[in-house]
Image (cartoon, grey):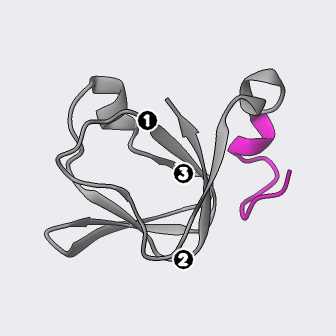
């Protein structure tokens, strides 16, 4: 499995039965993966691509391959605090 980051990255560690149960999701450029104010029913591992984190149409951060998206709200049971939008065609693995 090849991603856009170093071979010693996260996806090289995640192999075997647990990884095979994750659902791979393509995300088209411009698609909002996470919407602020919504319930956190999943978190995502970015396999390829880039995402912008936005609040009130202001860019807060950019997230790329090897990163995790939405883990804080997912693990704490809180609502999402920002929008996450695909900056280009991307692939994520959903953990719910």
| Label 2 environment density (alpha carbons within 10 Å; few <14, some 14–19, many ≥20) | some
Vertical placement of residue 78 versus 23, above or below: above
Question: Would residue 37 appear left or right of 46 to someone viewing this image?
Answer: left
Q: Which residue is mark 2?
A: 88
Q: Nearer the viewer, mark 1 or mark 3?
A: 1
* Separation (CA) of disc 1 from disc 3: 14 Å
Q: Which residue is mark 1?
A: 42
Question: Would residue 10 appear left or right of 15 to someone viewing this image?
Answer: left
Magenta stretch prevailing secondary structure: loop
Residue 57 image point, x, y percent:
19, 75
- Residue found at the very far left of the displayed protein: 56
User: Which quarter of the figure has residue 58?
Assistant: bottom left
Q: Is residue 10 magenta?
A: yes
Q: Front-most of 59 and 6? A: 59
Residue at left 29%, top 35%?
A: 73
Q: Which residue is mark 3?
A: 67
Please tell me whether mark 3 sits on a helix, a strand or a loop: loop
Residue at left 86%, top 50%?
A: 1
Q: In the rendered structure, which disc, 1 or 3, sits on the residue that comes first in sequence?
A: 1
Please tell me whether mark 2 sits on a helix, a strand or a loop: loop
Vertical placement of residue 17 versus 64, above or below: above
Residue 30 image point, x, y percent:
43, 76
**Number of callouts:** 3
| Mark number displayed over residue 21 | none
Give the residues in magenta: 1-13
């Amino acid at each position: 499995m090849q991603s856009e980051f170093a071979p010693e990255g996260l996806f090289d560690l995640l192999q075997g039965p647990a990884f095979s149960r994750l659902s791979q999701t393509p995300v088209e450029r411009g698609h909002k993966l996470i919407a602020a104010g919504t319930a956190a029913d999943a978190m995502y591992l970015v396999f390829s691509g880039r995402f912008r984190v936005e609040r009130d149409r202001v860019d807060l951060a950019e997230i790329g391959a090897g990163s995790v998206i939405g883990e804080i709200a997912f693990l704490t049971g809180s609502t999402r605090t920002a929008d996450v939008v695909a900056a280009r065609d991307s692939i994520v693995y959903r953990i719910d």
